[in-house]
Image (cartoon, helix red, strand yellow):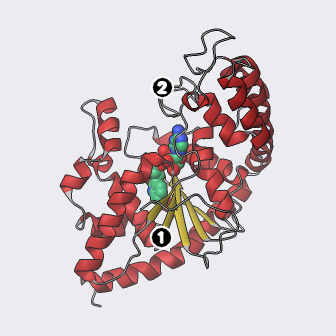
Amino acid sequence: MVASDVKPDAQDDKRRVFSGIQPSGIMHVGNYVGAIRNWVNMLDSYECTFCVVDLHAMTVPYKAEEMRRRVFEAFAVNMAAGLDPGRCRLFVQSHVPEVTELCWILMNCSSMGELSRMTQFKEKSEKLGGQVCAGLFTYPVLMAADILLYKASIVPVGDDQTQHLEFAREVARTFNSRFGETFPEPAPLLSKVPRLMGLDGKDKMSKSLDNYISLLDDKELIWDKLRTAATDPARMRRGDPGTPEKCNLYAMHRAFSPQEDVRWAAEGCRTAGIGCIECKRCLAGHMAEELAPVRERYAELSADPENIRRLMAEGARQCSAIARRTMEEVRQKVGLRQL
Ligand code: AMP
Ligand code: TRP
């Protein structure tokens, strides 16, 4: 089951929401429209917990001396994008170590067969050649542990995570049937742009493919990148009509432009009333307008690292209290710790 798009005013008696993001150094507009903007819209209607998943980031080769900076930046960008720690719990995964214990317990409720079917594992391990560690294989178990530790039932993510969510539900079901009803089955919640393609128009926007616009790019850089971005190949010449639904720029318009400009772009594309450059210029304006305050807030936040560290500690403190409670219940149910 996939929950429908979020309405900011959804009255859902504060159901628990959890989601995570990797500290990958860059946060791009795909992450933003696929996940984070949805998270921000949920802050007041749900009980929200969001996490910078540094333990997940260890599953591919990385430099230890860069990890701390990446985590710090990811925390600050998330805040700059609108995750207000006063309205949600925002924390760093490794700061609440109970998740690794739950992960181990859930490892024993996880099927090897299911894990080996994970598309993301196949893709990532192919890229890594022979250098695949066991952590990459069991990545979805840690993700299930993240969600279940906080007993979240709604998980707002981009569509590349729906298979992992299916897996997390299976793990919850297995645990509940073996040890008694403990965890709600978490459902993914997709935004209206659950998969934004990259500037090449071929693959999903991602950091590793270098086909992205960063949340921190300025107006000039945004325009530079959009100017050369791929559009509907049918529009070879200015007079050739196109199909907006086949154009990635149209998907970006739907994500960033007001309704009347989305209609203008669709109509102009279909009738060749406008050229791709005009269409891109309009989009660049709206995107830059939405991202400018994010960039400004980021600059302010990163100028005060002490404050970020304080907020990280506070997020970890709030989450630890929940994590400890869940783990006491879990240990009891699985037959551990009879002191
Ligand atoms: P990651 O950076 O892989 O940790 O992803 C963080 C969140 O952004 C996840 O919910 C992803 O599903 C989502 N996401 C990543 N790339 C895209 C994309 N190109 N379009 C839409 N959502 C995305
Ligand atoms: N695997 C997710 C991604 O790559 C990040 C993540 C880790 C996550 N734990 C999570 C997402 C728990 C949702 C819920 O994007």
> Which residue has dot 1 on it?
153
Give the quadrant of residue 44. bottom right
Q: Quadrant of the C terminus?
A: bottom left
Q: Amino acid at mark 1?
A: Ser
Residue 221 visible from this viewpoint: no
Give the quadrant of residue 328. bottom left
Q: Residue at x 62, y 55 (%)?
A: 38
Q: Which mark is residue 202?
A: 2
Picture coordinates of residue 259 (x, y %)? 75, 43
Q: Secondary structure at mark 2?
A: loop
Q: In the orientation shown, which residue stands out farthest toward the left?
A: 113
Q: Residue at x 71, y 29 (%)?
A: 267
For this rendering, which residue is in front, 121 or 79?
121
Q: Is residue 202 above or below residue 108?
A: above
- Mark 1: give few (<14), some (14-19) or many (20+) Cα within 10 Å: some
- Mark 2: give few (<14), some (14-19) or many (20+) Cα within 10 Å: few
Q: Quadrant of the N terminus?
A: bottom left
Of callouts 2 and 1, the N-terminal one = 1
Q: Is residue 327 above or below residue 266?
A: below
Residue 162 visible from this viewpoint: yes
Q: Secondary structure at mark 1?
A: loop
Q: Left or right: 287 with respect to 172?
A: right
Distance, label 2 to label 1, CA atoms, is 33 Å
Q: Residue at x 35, y 55 (%)?
A: 140
Would the CB of label 1 be found within 8 Å of ligand 2? no
Would the CB of label 2 be found within 8 Å of ligand 1? no
Q: In the orientation shown, which residue stands out farthest toward the front?
A: 271
Q: In the orientation shown, which residue stands out farthest toward the top?
A: 237
Q: Which mark is residue 60?
A: none
